[in-house]
Image (spheres, grey):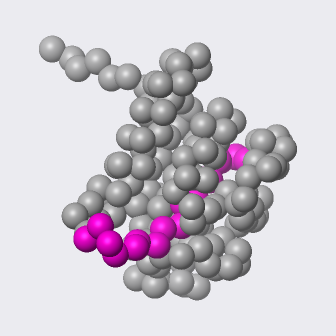
Amino acid sequence: MKKKTTPFWLEGMTVEERDHSISSLFALLEQKLGNVHKAIDVPVKRAFVFVPDPPPLIFEAQTQGFEICLVSWGVAGRAAATESPEMAAALAPIMFDLWPDSLYVIAFETELPDSTTLGRWIAEVLRAEFDAAPSNKMRVSLLPNYALMVFDWGDLVS
């Protein structure tokens, strides 16, 4: 018997369904980082990064008004980043509604670096995940601990 899967993000989802999907996203990122059982009183720094590929023309317009860092990376890549889990949760529905071919959501286990460094990290994470060999400019071991979730267009629409 084939298991029925429900796409992560459907057009026309209710607010409750969207909230549940966003909560699940951040729970899975935490689980991948392996920090679910850290002491509650120890603050954990996170940098949340949304990378739509390709970046849609309305990217800047849709992210206006958010206290986020807009990052250029690679040749024409764009990303939105924040350290605030609340801001990341508020930004996530906007990013999923952009309907890019792919959306990469990365959580780095560190505070948000400068834009140049973050751009290099994004490029290196995607290279490490999808190419066989890392670039000569940076070894993967120099990256902070991270969790990556990849959504392609089929995951984002029914």
The residue at the far left in this view is 1
Q: Position of residue 44 (x, y in %)?
A: 40, 72
In the image, the segment drawn in magenta is: 39-55
Determine whether 135 is above or below 106 in the image: below
| Residue 45 lies in the magenta-colored region | yes
Q: Position of residue 143 (x, y in %)?
A: 46, 78
Q: Could you say which is closer to the camera, residue 116 or residue 64?
A: 64
Determine whether 66 is above or below 14 in the image: below
Q: Residue at x 42, y 67 (%)?
A: 146
**The N terminus: image quadrant:** top left
Q: Residue at x 47, y 39 (%)?
A: 22
| Residue 153 lies in the magenta-colored region | no
Would you say 60 lies left or right of 123 here?
right
Q: Residue at x 32, y 72 (%)?
A: 41
Would you say 124 lies left or right of 141 here?
right
Q: Could you say which is closer to the camera, residue 51 or residue 39?
A: 39
Q: Residue at x 58, y 85 (%)?
A: 137
